[in-house]
Amino acid sequence: MQWHWRRSITTVCMERVNTLLRNVELPQPWSMNSFIDRLEAYRGRQIDLYPFTWTPDLGSTGAWERYDDHDVIAYAANTTAAHQDYNILHEVGHMISSHGRQCVLASAEALTLAPTLGATAFGHLMTTVSFTRAEKEADMIATLLLARIARGDTGGLDHRMEALR
Ligand SMILES: [Zn+2]
């Protein structure tokens, strides 16, 4: 049976983010590793973060694969911390939306949206226009979560940079 109307992506995603944040507290100061730990406890499933070195021929900057007993999120390590967070949270968006079992941020889209994967990649990713509904939802959830993280006065998103010092 079809709904007579389709709720907006924003409404649907805000509900999912609110439900998530009622159960998984955002770490302060912000730490992706701590957040993933809490998300694992909430979902009762292990999540493995897999950093990889992005190259132009590789295209994709992030991916999610659901296995029977755990999830794997692969993310490009050679980009800004904010862009890494965005890519990981995009995949988390798929998880909490019960989307299919796999996402690979498409090569063409990644190259179009983030041609250099430099400091401007984050902004470019905010202008996504051509994704499917599921991809739009994952992007929206990542954006909403990053806004909540930023409002938490966590001292910025450069935790990985600090770790390298
Ligand atoms: Zn996706």
Image (spheres, helix red, strand yellow):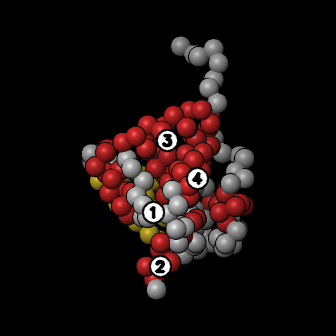
Q: Amino acid at mark 4?
A: Ala
Asked whether disc 3 touches disc 1, contact meaning CB atoms under 8 Å apart, the reply is no
Query: How far apart are the two marked residues, 3 and 4, measured between alpha carbons?
Result: 11 Å
Tag nearer the camera, 3 or 1: 1
Asked whether disc 4 touches disc 2, contact meaning CB atoms under 8 Å apart, the reply is no
Element under disc 3: helix
Residue that mark 2 sits on:
162
Residue that mark 4 sits on:
147
Mark count = 4
Q: Determine crowd level at label 3: few under 14, some 14-19, many 20+ residues with C-alpha closer than 10 A.
A: many
Q: Which mark is residue 30?
A: 1
Going from N to C along the chain, the mark reached first, 4 or 2, is 4
Q: Nearer the viewer, residue 109 or 141?
A: 141
Residue that mark 3 sits on:
17
Query: At which x and y percent is residue 46?
Result: 29, 53
Whether 19 is drawn above or below 85: the answer is above
Query: At which x and y percent is residue 124?
Result: 71, 60
Going from N to C along the chain, the mark reached first, 2 or 1, is 1
Asked whether mark 1 and ligand 1 are closer than 8 Å, the reply comes as: no
Query: How far apart are the two marked residues, 2 and 3, measured between alpha carbons?
Result: 27 Å
Q: Determine crowd level at label 4: few under 14, some 14-19, many 20+ residues with C-alpha closer than 10 A.
A: few
Query: At which x and y percent is residue 63?
Result: 49, 57
Whether 115 is drawn above or below 66: the answer is below
